[in-house]
Structures are given as structure tokens and as C-alpha cells.
Image: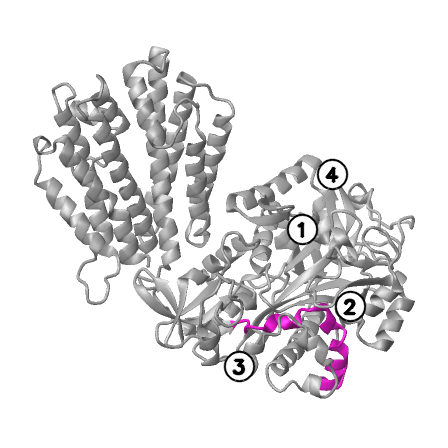
Amino acid sequence: MDGTSQKIVPPAYERLLADYRTLPGIADELLDASGQVRPVWHGFLNELAAFSPDDLEHAFARGNQYLRDAGVFFRHYGPGASTEREWPLSHIPLIIKRQEWENIASSLMERADLLEQVIADFYSENRMVGEGILPAGVLAANPEWLRPLVGVKPKSGHFLHFIAFDIGRGPDGNWWVLGDRTQAPSGSGFALETRMATARSFSSLMNHANVARLAGFFRQFRDSLLGLREQDGSRVAILTPGPLNDTYYEHAYIARYLGFMLVQGSDLAVRNGKLMVRTVGGLKPVSVLWRRVDSEWIDPLELNDESRLGAAGMTGALRSGSFTMVNAAGSGALEIRALMAFIPKIAQHLTGKPLSMPNIATWWCGGNAELDYVKANLSRMLIDRAMSTRLPFDHSPQAILSGRMRDGTPVDPGWIDVHGEDLVAQEAVSLSTTPAFSNGKLVARPMSLRVFLARTPNGWSVMPGGFARIGSSGGSADISMQRGGSVSDVWVVSDTPETQDTLIASSATGYLRPELGSLPTTAADNLFWLGRYVERTEHSVRLLRAYHLRLAETGTADYPIARFLGDHIARRGIDPDTALPAQLLQDIESAIRSAGNVRDRFSNDGWNALVDLKNTARMFASKVQAGDDAARAYSILLRKISGFSGLVHENMYRFTGWRFLGIGRSVERIVDTLDFLNSFTDEEAPIGAFELAIEVGDSIMTHRRRFAVETRRETVVDLLLLDDMNPRAVLNQLRVLNDHAAFLPAHEGERTTAFQRRIMELVTALSTSTANDIPSDRLAEISAEAGGLSSLLAESYLR
């Protein structure tokens, strides 16, 4: 149906579809070829039509707010830099009838089985090449075909465990495969979050539409991975490239959702041919590794010597069969565009029949007949790099579209002749359109669908949904999120109510209680520094508030106590003359960066509290003035820090990670308190320094109740150094550290670690001292001894 054809729309939908225009020669998911609304959409449109414009705006806002609260983002790559951006939700779901979905699922399972045979052949006998089905040059030039892994058989017996297919509907209404994702397919976690956000917008619509649930798919895959473990207490881990990866949020989300350990390459080591994870309790075995890192980066020893994302010797561990990798290393060899040119022939050769769902028509330009055909049909071809893994609508800068280079220059056919083996041609994609909301109305936008498959003991399981990429305009090239595209939920709907599936394990799976020491060292280090940065920020805020209060009282920074405090703040690397200094913002950013590195272990509420602190501080930095205005702003920041601290103290499970977070806060509080005690109790300190110390130490009311005398050096030292009932005192925090350390895993052959021994030495020294026993030189000695706690912790637990 073209854009001028008459739509046959029931009166209830007229307002919604008044501006809905399909494109000539393009299939549409909402309207059929005669302009009628497809039956599968009637229920959704009936309820959507009842929404007023304000109701619809509020519904969309609920979905957007959920994503913001959950911290869902993707990393956008621009010229020379990358930035975190909010997940681009397209609020109108793609709706597919259950019967059609079952056909899609069975076709993709068929293709998955074929790809398993192909990749097994690539790394064993190479019959496809030997029998002339696949040119040797295509395999030899494949950058993802890893020669060190030829002959290595996966321990599980399968190369592929979790894969995805990008599919699109062509003008004839049939589905086509646009790309195979077998390397480390992303998006399943985002599909879950997209579902959650859409449910917030249209909860009643979802219930009435009998939408298939996603949890059962993840439960089956989780149980499948757990079933691959060795019976030696070994673990399932997810290997992530780290927070700078564009899909890191998903890695953390999936790890948290499935209960698996999230690790980086620095957490892993190979010992005696076995893969191990470095934890605070020592090396622990890993028997299943779900990698979200491209294969060539898993081993700097045999694959890519520049890699810092894997572990040296991992290829050897795979060769010895000591662990299962999901997917098998080297499985990305199936993703190149050139291979799609031969998949139809391979399918016929291996199965004796064509695939139920073909891939987009593809020609490798290294063959004479294919090259001649491509040159004769340049006007309807997209020509790009043969070894590219991009999707057809994601053109490279070197792409040739309809016979023209990206700058509009006609391509020289002789150039194609010269570079034929390096090129592949595909029919220019004309994707079907689906409804999206733009400027307050429904419009038709091109879409593609990503479908996920997971291997289980009973065969392939297909996620009943996935997510759809939605173009930002009428062109297929704008589907990519890097080019402004968005993402919508996919509803597979039935005529009967769906089973309320959950992630809860079956009773046959059993229960495995995690060990206390199974915290990776990288996660422990980030939690420790999160605690330090938050406490450092709080202490700096207290110092700056005190400084600006004195500016407000005296009107000058030259007043002795103000100048003294300003000099102390400056020695911390903070500019006291700036109302809200850049260093304070940097410490908050460092806290957020540390928290971001452990998103799988951090609650959304805790994360949002930190983000709120950052946003508030940034806002104040642009508007507050020195003096009373800044002091009030710092009081607000203190309350927000206290809110974060309360969330951590009241809600965070007392596992090993919580201990390291607490250790970080206590170590920083001890160091900072000793730092200002050394300054404020010095005999050269000006009048008012003792009172200032009590104020910065948040102990004014306690001092008044405990001491019926004026503030003196002895009362300050007693209250902020030696009082084990005062949470601001050094001795109190040393006892807190001692309690935390007692719960940390013991090392083999050691009753206590060097970290624990230093704590106990300091506790003993301070417990047997009085304020009169602590002159300035002794206070400096205590500061030096406490200053070594961080290094001793790293030496004891973070190696």
C-alpha cells in the first residue's frame, strides 16, 4: 500500500492514525496491503484510543522514568569521544501473533543448528572448503577464524550456546535474516529492561493482550549453564570488557539478574591449565565462562598480545578442556557478510533442503559469475567489505550504495574488479515499517527485529520477543542507535492467557549458597574506593561549609581562623576560594565511576542517590556564591550524602562487598580525622581551631554533653581520637575496621593478615592511652601508621 492509498480505519482509531502514512512498496506491521488494520493490533489500538493526549504523555513518562531510575544507558561513540546516553525507548511495541512467532522461532532454530555444523567444520575437518562449497580464501581471510583454536573441541560438545539473529520483513511480507550474531550477542538484558519500561507505560494493555513472558527463557538458560559446571564448587562467570564498553550496563544487569559473577580480565588467571578467578579469599575455579568479549581478546599469549581484556593461557585452558566457554572462542567467524553468500549452498549440501527463512540475498565478489552479476545490477546493490560484521543497514564509510560512493561519486566498475575478493554485495534493504510516536502522533518507521536463542538440554529455546530497532526517519540506515534510532518492546500475543513464568529455579536444580570469599578482587577494590571517595567527599564538604560559614560571619578570608582553614583545605588540593571547587566534583565523579564498575553488586536506589548527589553538586557549582549561600548548599549536599549512607547501612546485604565498602569509609575517615587533628591541635593553630575541629568532626553536641569545660586540646583529642563510643573518633573506626576484617576470608597458613595486625596494634595503642599521652609528635606517628592501612589491605586481599 502506498502513502496515497485510502486507509480503512475503524472510527475509534481515526485520531490515532490520522497522520499514519505507509511507504510505496514497503510492508507495514500495522496496516495490511489493502489499508486495513491487522487483527493482531485491534486490542492494543482499542485501549490506546481511550488515552487522552495527557494520559499518553504520562504513560510514556512512566516508562522513561523507570529507565532513568534503573540507570539504563548505552554508550554513544562520537568523533574522538564516547558518552553515556539514556536508553532510547520507542514506546509503541511491535506486536506479533503467537502463530507467526512460532514459525519465526522454528526457522531460526533450524538456522542455529546449521550454524553449529558450520562452525564445528571450520575448527575441525574443513569439509566445506575441501568439497568446494566455500572458497578457501573466504575462510583464510576471515579475521574471526582463529587458527590456534583449530582442532580444539568445546568441553560442552557445542560451539554455540547463546546466539541472536537480526531479521527483517521484506516487501513481500516474508521474514529474512539480516545478520547472524554468534560472537557475543548483546541486547538480551536490554530487552528485559525495555519490557519493564513498556510495562510501566501500558500495564493494563499488556495483561489484556496476553503477552508472552520473558523470564522462562532466562531461567532455562541459567539452569543450562549451571548444569555445565564441574562438581567442585566451581563457578559460572560472565566476562565483561569493563565499564567503557558500550553494553556494560547489560553485562552488569544480566549478572545480577541471573546471579552469576561478573569478572574482568584482570580478575582471571590460568593455573595448571585451569581457569581461576582472583577473589579476596584467593583463587577459585571457574568452569563456565560466558564471555562478552570478542574472541581474539581473551588471551594475550596466543591470540592478541595487546589485549588486557582476557587472561594469558586461556587458550591453553580451552585446549585442555578444563572449562566451557560460551560461546566457544572463534565462533564470531560465522558473522562475516561474505559467509551469507554461501549459507544457502551450505544448507542444501548439509541438509538437502533450503532454509525455511533465507538470509538477505548476498554475493561474494571474488567469483567471476557473481562479480559480473553485481556489476550488471549496481543500482540495487549495497557493496561493502566482505569481512565486515555490520548489518546491511549499518554502512561503513567505504560502502557503495546504488552504484555510488558515499560522496555521491559513481563507482568505477574496474575498481570493483580489482578489489572483488574483499567485497560483498547485498540487495539494498527495504525493511517493513511499524508504528512509532513522533511529535504527538503515530508514524510509520522502518524496523528490524533481534531474536535470541539459548541452548538447553532439550535443544534451542527462543526468547518470545526480543527487541525491535526503530528508525528515526523513513530510511533504513537510521535504525542504528548510534545514528539516532530507538528500541521498542516486542509483544508475542496469544488468544489465551499466558503462564506467569518466573526466574525461580525448579526444585530439581537444588540450592547452592554462595561462599563468603567469592568476591572478585577488582570488585572489592572498587567497593573499597567507593567508600573512600564518598567519605572523602563528606569530609571536604564539612571543611568547606565551615570555611564559608566563617566567611559569612567575618566577611573576609583574611581573618586568622578563616585563613588557617583555607590553607588546610588548599593542602588537600581543593581551592577554598571557589564556592564549589572542581576537585570536589572530581571526587564525586570518582565515587560514581567506582560504583559504575560494580553495577552488578549495587542497588538502583544507591546508584540513584549518587547520581542525585552529582547532579545537585553540578547545579550548585554553576550558581552558588561564596559565604552563606555556599554554606547552605553544602548543608544540602551533606544531607544527600547521609541519604546514600543510610541506604547502604540499612539495605545492603552484609556480604563481603559490603565489608569492603565499609572498610573504605572507615579508612578514609581515620586518615582525614588524623589529618585535621594534626593541624587543628597544633600549638601554632589560631584561636578557634579547637572549636573548628569539633565542628568538622560533627561532635558539637557530644562535646557539650561530655565535657563541662571549654574546648581544649585534651577534650578534642579525647573525643575525636580516643573515644570508642563516638563514630567520628579514630578509635571507634579502628574497632569497626577490626570487626569488618574478622569477617574477611582467612588466607591459608595465616591466622591474621598484615592488615588485621596493623589494626590491632593501633587499637591497643589508643585503648591504653589518654589525651595527655598524645603530644603532637605522637599524633604524627599514629597518622603515619594509619596511613599504611590502605596498602596493607591491598597486599592482603587485592593482589
Q: Quadrant of residue 748?
A: bottom left
For marks 3 and 1, the one nearer the N-term is: 3
Instruction: Give the number of the mark in front: 2 or 1.
Output: 2
Q: What stretch is highlighted in magenta?
A: 326-355
Residue 579 in the image: above or below residue 501: above
**410 displayed left or right of 160:** right
Front in this rendered view, residue 447 or 670: 670
Disc 4 residue type (three-letter) = Gly
**74 displayed left or right of 645:** right
Write the residue at 60% across / 47% down: 87
Disc 3 residue type (three-letter) = Val
Q: Does residue 259 appear in this view?
A: no
Which residue is denoted by mark 4 in the rendering?
Answer: 440
Expressed as whole percent of the image width and height from the top left, the position of residue 177 reads 73, 67
Instruction: Give the number of the mark in front: 4 or 2.
Output: 2
Front in this rendered view, residue 641 or 784: 784
Circle 2 — which element? strand
Figure disc tally: 4
**131 displayed left or right of 24:** left
Circle 3 — which element? loop
Which residue is denoted by mark 3 in the rendering?
Answer: 152
For the residues labelled 3 and 4, the Cα–Cα distance comes to 56 Å
Q: Do the residues bearing badges 3 and 1 touch, measured as CB atoms within 8 Å?
A: no
Which residue is denoted by mark 2 in the rendering?
Answer: 424
